[in-house]
Image (cartoon, rainbow, N blue to C red):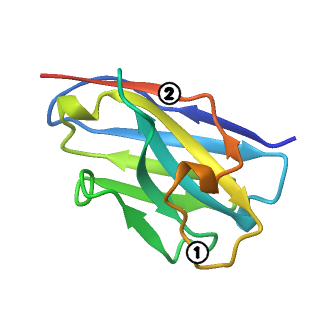
Amino acid sequence: QVQLVESGGGLVQAGGSLRLSCAASGRSFSSAAMGWFRRAPGKEREFVAAISRSGGSLHYADSVRGRFTISRDNAKNTVYLQMSSLKPEDTAVYYCAANFGVSTYVVLTTTSSYGFWGQGTQVTVSS
């Protein structure tokens, strides 16, 4: 049974930083392409960032490029999202997602591409 557990969310002032973590268990983490998504109040879930199995391929939503950094530590079965220069519009529940068995350098950017999801962690950015 695959489990994804996010942590690191919280309340931060605009311009501040947070680092989200997503710990995976249940299957070989190094075989999973990983992604971060978010859902703001009243909106649909949207793509934030994705990383390939090896970590060699990255992709970001335009709204976060240059401010957020996705990374992974396969030895710790964990994917991270470093968020800097946070804005009130970044307020959302952030979810990590996994898809196993994809090619090494593939990044996945749609919700339908992922088969496994975490429960989410709340990020609130005050102005």
Mark 1 sits on what residue?
106
Position of 45 relative to 127 (above/below): below
Crowd class of label 1 (few under 14; some 14 to 19; many from 20; radius 10 Å) = some
Quarter in which the C terminus is drawn: top left
Numbered disc 2: secondary structure? strand
Q: Nearer the viewer, residue 18 or 49?
A: 49
Asked which quadrant contains residue 19, the reply is top left
- 73 or 53, which lies in front? 53
The numbered disc on residue 121 is 2
Q: Is residue 75 left or right of residue 34?
A: right
Question: What residue is at 37 percent from the left and 48 percent from the top?
Answer: 82
Determine crowd level at label 2: few under 14, some 14-19, many 20+ residues with C-alpha closer than 10 A.
many
| Residue 76 visible in the picture | no
| Residue at x 53%, y 37% (from the top left corner) | 95
Res. 74 image quadrant = bottom right
The relative height of residue 122 versus residue 113 in the rendered view (above or below) is above
Q: Is residue 64 above or below residue 31?
A: above
Residue 75 horizontal/vertical position (percent): 69, 61
Alpha-carbon span between mark 1 and mark 2: 25 Å
Q: Is there any visible trace of residue 26 in the rendered image? A: yes
User: Mark 1 or mark 2: which comes first in sequence?
Assistant: 1
Numbered mark located on residue 44 in the image? none
Q: At 52% across and 55% down in the image, what residue appears?
A: 110
Mark 1 and 2 residues: CB-CB less than 8 Å, in contact? no
Instruction: Give residue 113's position: percent from left, percent from top.
Output: 62, 57
Tell me: residue 50, above or below residue 12.
below
Task: Indicate the secondary structure of the residue bearing disc 1.
Answer: loop
Q: The residue under label 1 is which amino acid type? A: Val
Q: Residue type at mark 2?
A: Thr
